[in-house]
Image (cartoon, rainbow, N blue to C red):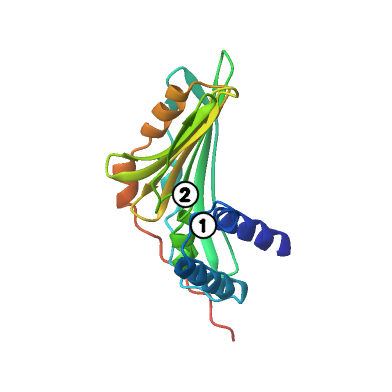
Amino acid sequence: MKRIRLAVLIATLTPVLALAQPGGEQSPANMEDMMKAMGAIMSGGTNAAAVVDFRELKALLPAALDGMKRTNASGEKSGAMGMTVAFAEGTYEADAGGSITIKISDNGGLGGFMAFAQASWAASEIDRESDTGFERTTTYGQNKAHEEYDNSGKSGKVEILVAGRFMVEASGNDIAWEAIQAAAKKVDTAKLATLKPKAATPAPAQP
């Protein structure tokens, strides 16, 4: 149990802790709120909401991508320290080499802490480019998105924030940028936004 809780906490705090490093874009007021939220989680407090059934997220994974077949699809719901997250993940491989992973997450169960987990890019405007690649924020339809790609390693990812709680991430290795971008667009974000959380089943009363 301790190992599961630690894994969930690390996965949740990683985007936020990045902001605390030199160059992180965060105001003093937001930093204060962030520390309060972290303290609430560490003490077991939460305002987390229910999450959707991960099977509904899994159903939104594309059956295949252009020139790539899906080799695995999985999903789960997990929780610890008053936080809950549901996600589904699909792996796609090309015969000529290269792979793409698509992950669809419902992070609504992280409660008020979700805002800080997203703050590393969703509340920012980023536009950087060099000879080796780029990083930028943009929009996919009405959804805020983050793109980055490394030309030398032919690796990158697209993250799309949907309805303030869902995250679609397409990441690729040894693959062209256009393939990663096309993979992200394969997910039906309009349908994703309509999914409703599944109410938690009350625990049975103790005799």
Q: Is residue 38 visible?
A: yes
Q: Which mark is residue 185?
A: none
Name the quarter where the C terminus is drawn. bottom right
Query: Residue 9: where, in percent of width, then height?
Result: 62, 61
Q: Earlier in the sequence, mark 2 or mark 1?
A: 1
The residue carrying mark 1 is 85
Amino acid type indicated by mark 2: Ser
Query: Residue 11: where, in percent of width, then height?
Result: 60, 54
Q: Is residue 89 left or right of residue 80?
A: left
**Considering depth in this image, is 207 or 161 the residue closer to the camera?**
161
Judge the density around disc 1: few (<14), some (14-19), many (≥20) Cα neighbours within 10 Å.
many
Where 31 falls versus 117 (above or below)? below
Q: Is residue 200 visible?
A: no
The residue drawn where x is 43% and y is 67% is: 49
Query: Residue 22: where, in percent of width, then height?
Result: 59, 53
Q: Secondary structure at mark 2?
A: strand
The residue carrying mark 2 is 105
The residue drawn where x is 51% and y is 67% is: 31
Quarter of the figure with residue 7:
bottom right
Cβ atoms at labels 2 and 1 below 8 Å apart = yes
Amino acid type indicated by mark 1: Val
Quarter of the figure with residue 199:
bottom left
The residue drawn where x is 46% and y is 28% is: 180
The residue drawn where x is 57% and y is 21% is: 98
Judge the density around disc 2: few (<14), some (14-19), many (≥20) Cα neighbours within 10 Å.
many
